[in-house]
Amino acid sequence: MPEGEVCESLKDNKVVCINDDCKIPKEEPRYVAPGKISGQRSTYDYRIAGKAVDGLTNSHSHTEKDNLPYWWVDLGNIYNIMRIEVINRFEHGYDSRLHDLDITVGPA
């Protein structure tokens, strides 16, 4: 492992390393996604991507049953991301709608 880096082994036996020079911000965390531009691969039943970043926990976006569905948000600025919170929908006793989730953070 290179000096000053943190490395993690992935499922496919690849190793990802990042610089360990991150500093914990002194300011309070902020929810930066509301109202930002977002999109998704497909739309099911008018559940547009923006519903996922409207700040409400009782609305949601929904894709069709795509092979590789995705959703994205452009935060419009560079932020020190310390936490990403995803709330899975729970309806009619079925809470496994969102699964096998990959999250990627970085410039588009």
Image (cartoon, rainbow, N blue to C red):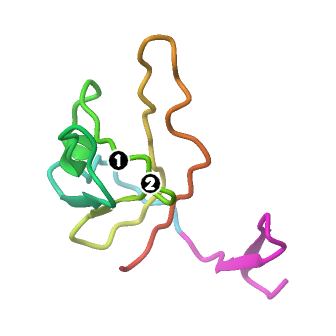
x%, y% of residue 38?
23, 59
Numbered range of the magenta stretch = 1-22
- Is disc 2 placed on a helix, strand or loop? loop
The secondary structure type at the circle numbered 1 is: loop
Query: Residue 18: which quarter of the image?
Result: bottom right
Q: Which quarter of the rendering shows the N terminus?
A: bottom right
User: Where 108 sits versus 102, above or below?
Assistant: below
Cα distance in 3D space between marks 1 and 2 = 7 Å
Q: Which residue is mark 1?
A: 63
For the point 28% across and 35% down, which residue is it?
A: 60
Q: Are marks 1 and 2 in contact (CB under 8 Å)?
A: yes
Pick the front one: 34 or 48: 48
Residue drawn at the location 44% of the way across and 42% of the way down: 85
Locate residue 20 relative to residue 36 in the image: left or right.
right
Please, is residue 3 above or below residue 93 in the view?
Answer: below
Q: Quadrant of residue 57?
A: top left
Residue type of the residue flagged with mark 1: Thr
Is residue 15 one of those drawn in magenta? yes
Q: Is residue 15 left or right of residue 82?
A: right
Which percent across, then down, holds residue 3?
Answer: 79, 86
**63 in relation to 88, above or below:** below
Q: Most extreme residue toward the bottom, as rendered? A: 2
Q: Nearer the viewer, mark 1 or mark 2?
A: 2
Amino acid bearing label 2: Asp
For mark 2, does the 10 Å Cα neighbourhood hold few (<14), some (14 to 19), or many (20 or more) residues?
few
**The one of 32 and 39 positioned closer to us in this rendering:** 39
User: Which residue does the numbered mark 2 point to in the structure image?
Assistant: 66
As rendered, which of 4 and 50 lies closer to the eye? Answer: 50
Quick check: 22 above or below 101? Answer: below
| Picture quarter with the C terminus | bottom left
